Image (cartoon, rainbow, N blue to C red):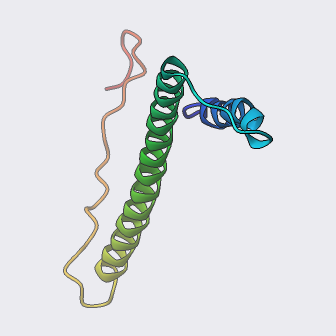
Amino acid sequence: MGERMSLELSDGLAELDGLVAEFQHEPRIFDPNDARILGDRIKQLRRLARDLENRLSRDLWNGAARTERDAEAERIAEAAFQPGSNVCLFPVIPRPFSDGRPGGRA
């Protein structure tokens, strides 16, 4: 199967929301250390969001390319089998066969 999706981004955002919820009811001030911790966590969550966006973009891009490639292959195959095409199948040639036993037919 493919890669497993991480819930670290959504869990981190929920955690951040819970930590900031205290500040919704009354004014408070961050001390510099708390502000650094918050900034570091936001940078980490931004990196996770970018990774997720890149994975989605890659999957969408590859899916579109696969669809285009399949359509082109189908178009070529249809053109090859049209009347008047210069494509023909090779004749079937009998191949020698051996069952691998001594004295077997070859």
| Figure quadrant of the C terminus | top left
Where is residue 103, by image quadrant?
A: top left
Counting labels gives 0
Position of residue 59 measured from the top left corner of the image (x, y, whole percent):
46, 51
The residue closer to the viewer here, 91 or 61, is 61
Is residue 48 toward the left or the right of residue 18 in the image?
A: left
- In percent of the image, x 52 and y 34: which residue is there? 45
Is 42 above or below relative to 72? above
Is 25 above or below relative to 32? below
Is residue 45 toward the left or the right of residue 95 in the image?
A: right
Is residue 14 toward the left or the right of residue 6 in the image?
A: right
- In percent of the image, x 62 and y 29: which residue is there? 8
Position of residue 17 measured from the top left corner of the image (x, y, whole percent):
70, 37
Is 9 above or below relative to 64? above
Position of residue 68 measured from the top left corner of the image (x, y, whole percent):
37, 69
Is residue 90 toward the left or the right of residue 43 in the image?
A: left
- In percent of the image, x 47 and y 48: which residue is there? 53
- Farthest-out residue, right: 25
- Farthest-out residue, bottom: 84
- In percent of the image, x 75 and y 42: which residue is there? 24
- Farthest-out residue, left: 86
| Figure quadrant of the N terminus | top right
The residue closer to the viewer here, 90 or 102, is 90
